[in-house]
Amino acid sequence: MKDKIIFWISTAFISLWMLMSAVGYFLIPDMKTNFQHLGFPDYFRIELGIAKILGALAILLPLVPSKLKEFSYFGFILTFFSAIVAHLSVGDPFYVSLFPLFALIVILISFTYYHKLNNKN
């Protein structure tokens, strides 16, 4: 029971966070400026927004096949790690990287408990 609670809290949290950030990519003009600051082309903002929506749904919805969930987890882990590197590379202060670092920790918790629950079945 404890494992399910940890899984669902971490998974719901990261999924909602990804959905909100994806919506922000499309609706908040400053997000375009943030992507430019990091040196990314504007199409990457759109691409990442779509990928975050699809990934959040994939890890959140129980009927999604395991391989697709694994692919989504990998995509989020890569995204958060890349965000940390991107912010540090352009000289942003370390505290700016704390958000993606926290997200990386949460997604790793979700991923770990996803496997714990699926190995019990």
Image (spheres, grey):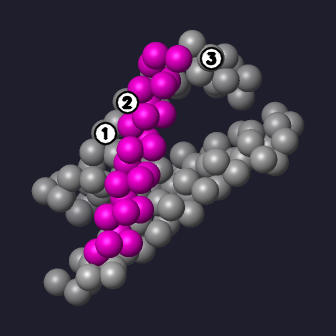
Image position of 12 (left or right of 99): left
> Which corner quadrant of the image does residue 20 belong to?
top left
Q: Position of residue 68 (x, y in %)?
A: 27, 54
Reading the image, the residue beneath label 3 is 30
**Crowd band around label 3 with a 10 angstrom C-alpha radius: few (<14), some (14–19), many (20+):** few
Boundaries of the magenta span = 4-28
Image position of 17 (left or right of 2): right
Q: Could you tell me which secondary element the residue under label 1 belongs to?
A: helix
Image position of 1 (left or right of 7): left
Amino acid type of the residue that numbered disc 1 sits on in the rendered structure: Leu
Q: Are discs 1 and 2 less than 8 Å apart at CB?
A: yes
Amino acid type of the residue that numbered disc 3 sits on in the rendered structure: Asp
Give residue 74's mark.
none
Q: Nearer the viewer, mark 3 or mark 2?
A: 3
Residue toward you, 9 or 71: 9
**Quadrant holding the C terminus:** bottom left
Residue at screen point 48% across, 25% down: 24
Reading the image, the residue beneath label 2 is 50
Q: Could you tell me which secondary element the residue under label 2 belongs to?
A: helix
